[in-house]
Image: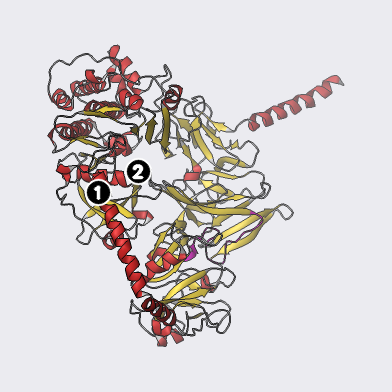
Amino acid sequence: MEEACALPSFFFTFFILIISNNAIDTTITKTHFVTDGNTIVSSSGTFELGFFTPRADSKNRYVGIWYKKISTGTVVWVANRETPIPDKSGVLKIIDPGILVLVNGFNQTVWFTNSSISAQNPVARLLDSGNLVVNDEKNPETEHLLLWQSFDYPGDTFLPGMKLGKNFVTGKEWYLSSWKSKVDPSQGGYTYRLDLRRYPQLVLSKGSTEQFRSGPWNGVRFSGPHLRPNPFYKYGVVFKNDEVYYTYELINSSVVSRFVLNPNGIGERSTWIDRTHGWMLYLTVPQDTCDSYKLCGPYGVCNVDKSPVCGCLSDKFVPKDPKNWDMTDWSSGCVRMTPLDCHNDGFVKFSGIKMPDTRQSWYNTTMTLEECREVCLKNCSCTAYTNLDVRGSGSGCLLWFHDLIDLRVFTDNGLNIYIRMASSDLGKIHIWTLQDSTDQQVVYHSKKRTIIIVSLALFSGMLLFALSLAFYVWQKKKKLHLKKEERMDHNSGQLYPNKNQKEDLELPFFDLATIVDSTNNFSIYNKIGEGGFGPVYKGILGGGQEIAVKRLSEYSTQGPNEFKNEVICIAKLQHRNLVKLLGCCIQGEEKMLIYEYMPNKSLDYFIFDQTQRTLLDWPKRFQIINGIARGLLYLHQDSRLRIIHRDLKASNILLDIGMNPKISDFGMARSFGGNEMAGNTKRVVGTYGYMSPEYALDGLFSVKSDAFSFGVLVLEIMSGKRNRGFYHPDHHLNLLGHAWILYKEDRSMELIDESLRDSCDLFEVLRSIHVGLLCVQQHPEDRPSMSTVVLMLGSEGVLPRPKQPGFFTERNLLEADCSSSKGTINSVNEMTISMLHAR
């Protein structure tokens, strides 16, 4: 009897062990793979990853993620969408330096990921959000950094926490793409993305043809009739310096909700119902006929409750092509009965319509509605305006130019738009809305203008006197201000014109309209970077010349002083290794610098990226090192003004089409006359990891502090590693300390980037490392001048042995400075810093 009981007990224990082993399969490591037939599961069992076949009569196998707790096994993400494996031989594994690889039975790579960060112990883990992430499990420096994640590569499904938008630093765009069919996960013909060519709006497209548009984001929702506050999920558009994206999260974690772009080009929001064991459709886009993009043409309005559905915006518009309009071809839209004359126009407030397409728009986040109206009125191409953000009493300004497209009735949106009308049309206006006709409020019309003119006539004498008095006071203040600025302010560390610098800078001035036109109204798609000064945009002038426009941001850590400083420093500098300033634009609050465009971005884009660094072989890197050295030599010795840059770093080295380096960003530079070569300041400006010890701690700067920054750059170019944040398992030194140890042990070759092994010149490589270490020595008197550096790099003479580097241990400058009670540090985006030292 006991033996009879023992057999079932053994099988029960064996079954429990099988379940236990399956339960712990939550990760992929270098020793634990996923083979066809096995899976990994998220910690709570919500999602599962493994191999699947989308149709019963096919042998094609895909790696996918699906809901585990839902009986239908709904797939939410597919890795190898375009490259299925024709049998069950597939293996998904992780290899150094943190790359997921899918191989077939012949060990051929079918699909793989990439990463710009190396990991010692890479691990892939499926999260309860449905996100497959790769990080470094045992490295405390990088365990919280994502090497790769599936959420960055969406398929047809939009899950909570995912993004639709773009990262402007990496250029990565997140968007949905449909399956080709219900049983073929390869990319179909439809996409759903956050369109950022102007102000953000969601757009569904078939190929390059728009099918549906959500309307612009207004701070609460998109201004179309679909997305509204609901009890299931909350959503929003997130604006950051480096990225803009749309996302959502569930209000109740027990609810399962997803958005899918199906193969027919319909976006479906569904919620899982346990009672019926099925998905309940919550909403779709497009939803009805009026969701068809620009169905009624310019100034046409679609109303699904009317027949025909299309009509003109008001009785002041008529169909452009009456014959085809009557035959239900509304694509040509409507035209004004009275043309605009620019100078006597006004605005009419319209409510209850979806906001027009924003691809011919401009926006400002700080303007009031009245300021918005004034700007629109002065621009003859501006046809409408509204508040950018409708929260509270409203804020910001959104302007439309040219024709208004893709309008539809949306009577419960509570939004107002002010549309430009000819002065003769500013009387009683009948709007084509849900009702047969309504009278709309005229915001600005001739009667109001007449009252203003009369008032001005009555008080003209008083106004003239007040204006004259104000002008006199302004002139006096201006003269005092100019006298004050004709001095070098040693306390601030900024450069102001002295008597020898009053001569005409001969710098071209660009008008705002030219710059706005060249950058497509500062389109987000034209944005190529962001720094302490503000965003940088690519522009194309009328003659085809490409430019880079650096626009002073209202949130900039730099201001008018730095703007003026950069103009003065670089206006008359001419050197092949300095970026060329073409001119500036100053109009109202707008301040912009216009530079030659550098198509290859900045040095950090290449040397710190796992993929891009392979494009810089040793000859190119040596060319860059020499070019930076010659540019600094020109600044320190050969230019009309002796200039110390004070913020030399990889991101401030731009690369032209031939990969020639150009030193940029002179907002923090200091200039000297005569034989002056050094100075001191209470305001320390620069970037962690590049600043010399005497400058960071005591505010002492000289040509030797630039030499220190150059030395850091050289070692970063050689190694492909950043000085700040450098990690090595054998010690806690930064890159400078690591390079010094290797040099002392005659192992300097171990420092160089692996991608240089096949192209490097051994003598040039070792000499460059040696020069770099000489430049980063602790004491400034030990460092070579840039003239000596240029000579060292180009000769074969014996070099002195470098001494200990400055800041060669991994330090926290913030704690070090606070502990000395010298002052405070203000760090901006962990990049450029300003330190104020009390005296």
Extreme residue in the top direction: 745
**Label 1 belongs to which residue?**
482
Q: Is residue 539 left or right of residue 196?
A: left
The spot of residue 681 in percent (x, y) is 31, 31
Say whether residue 573 is visible.
no
Split into 4 quadrants, where in the image is the C terminus?
top left
Residue 214 included in the magenta stretch of the image: yes
**Residue closest to the eye, 145 or 534:** 534
Query: How far apart are the alpha carbons under marks 2 and 1?
Result: 21 Å
Element carrying mark 1: helix
Q: Is residue 472 left or right of residue 178?
A: left
Q: Which disc, if any, is residue 558?
A: 2
Residue 15 included in the magenta stretch of the image: no
From which residue to which does the magenta span run?
211-232
| Residue visible at 30% across and 44% down in the picture | 561
Split into 4 quadrants, where in the image is the N terminus?
top right
Say whether residue 253 is visible.
yes
Quarter occupied by residue 128? top right
Instruction: Name which of mark 2 and mark 1 comes first in the sequence.
Output: 1
Secondary structure mostly taken by the magenta-highlighted segment of the chain: loop
User: What's the amino acid at mark 2?
Assistant: Gln
| Residue visible at 39% across and 35% down in the picture | 116
The spot of residue 508 in percent (x, y) is 19, 55
User: What's the amino acid at mark 1?
Assistant: Leu
Element carrying mark 2: loop
Q: Is residue 454 left or right of residue 9?
A: left
**Residue closest to the eye, 432 or 108:** 432
The spot of residue 14 in percent (x, y) is 71, 26
- The nearer-to-camera label among 2 and 1 is 1
- The answer to whether 771 is drawn above or below residue 176 in the figure is above
